[in-house]
Image (cartoon, grey):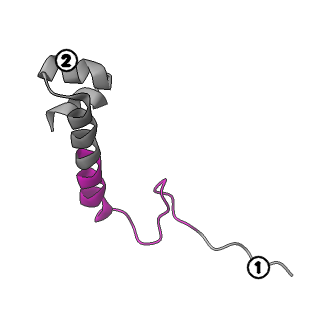
Amino acid sequence: RTPFMMYYIGYKYLEIAEKLQIPIGTVKNRIHIARKDLKAALHVYAPAGADRAGVLALDEPEQD
C-alpha cells in the first residue's frame, strides 16, 4: 500500500525503493498488485455498459 501511495503522489520507482529500502522489483510488484486490487474494488461501482473511461457505451444509430 505504501509504495502505491508514494507512486500516486509522484515518487518514481527508484525513489520509492531507496526510501523504503526494498528492491525496485518489489516496488513494481506491490504497485501492480495495489492497482489490480483497486480496479477490482472499483469495478462494482461502474454502471452496467460502461466502457473503460466510465462513459456509457451507447449503440450506434442505425443507418438507413
Q: Residue furthest bottom?
A: 64
Residue 34 x %, y %? 23, 46
Label 2 neighbour load within 10 Å: few <14, some 14-19, many 20+: few
- The amino acid type, in three-letter code, at marker 2 is Glu
- Please state which of residues 11 and 58 is positioned toward the viewer in this rendering: 11
- The amino acid type, in three-letter code, at marker 1 is Glu
| Residue underneath mark 1 | 62
SS of the residue at dot 1? loop
| Residue underneath mark 2 | 18
Taking the spot 28% from the left edge, 37% from the top edge, the residue there is: 28
* 38 over 14 or under it: above or below: below
- Please state which of residues 23 and 6 is positioned toward the viewer in this rendering: 23
Let me know if residue 15 appears in the view.
Answer: yes
Taking the spot 32% from the left edge, 22% from the top edge, the residue there is: 12
Taking the spot 51% from the left edge, 64% from the top edge, the residue there is: 56
Q: Quadrant of residue 27?
A: top left
Q: Which corner quadrant holds the N terminus?
A: top left
Q: Which corner quadrant holds the C terminus?
A: bottom right
Q: What span is in magenta?
A: 34-57
Front of the two marks 2 and 1: 2
Taking the spot 36% from the left edge, 63% from the top edge, the residue there is: 46
- Residue 38 is one of the magenta-drawn residues: yes
How far is disc 2 from disc 1 in space, using C-alphas?
Answer: 57 Å
